Image: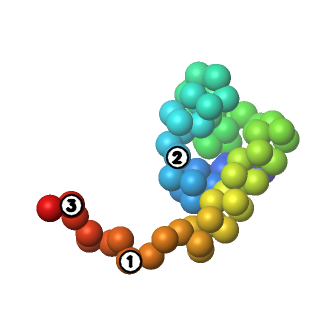
Amino acid sequence: MMPDRLDQCLSVIRWTPETLAQCLGCDVSVVHAWLAGKAEIPMNVAVWIEMMAEHHVAFEETKPKGLTGRRFP
């Protein structure tokens, strides 16, 4: 996985580098190094985050409609 694809996946699932680091149990500096192309993104991380993004896209297509702008009185 290339750094730009990791960045895209994080955007799709609405995660920050800090969120990914927290999920993986690593320091955020590791994620920043991946995003900057200074360190190789491990294959197991690449596969996992790619699957998360794919599922998120599929779930976005089925999320409930009609709640935009709605407020509780």
Q: CA distance from mark 2 to mark 1?
A: 25 Å
Q: Position of residue 73 (x, y in %)?
A: 14, 62
**For the residue marked with disc 2, what is the amino acid?**
Trp
The dot on residue 72 is: 3
Q: As rendered, which of 67 and 38 lies closer to the eye?
A: 67
Q: Is residue 8 visible?
A: no
Say which residue label 1 marks.
66
Amino acid type at mark 3: Phe
Q: Describe the element under mark 1 as helix, strand or loop.
A: loop
Regarding residue 12, the answer to whether it shows in the image is yes
Is label 3 in contact with label 2 (beta carbons under 8 Å)? Answer: no
- The residue most toward the front is 73
At 44% from the left edge and 76% from the top edge, which residue is drawn?
65
Residue at image coords 62%, 43%: 35
Question: How far apart in space, not on screen, are marks 1 and 3 (Cα)?
Answer: 14 Å
Mark 3, Cα crowd under 10 Å, few <14 / some 14-19 / many 20+, is few
From this view, report whether residue 23 is shown above or below residue 16: above
| In front: label 3 or label 2 | 3
Residue located beneath label 2 in the image: 15
Q: Quadrant of residue 13?
A: bottom right
Query: Dot 1, crowdedness within 10 Å: few (<14), some or many (≥20)?
Result: few
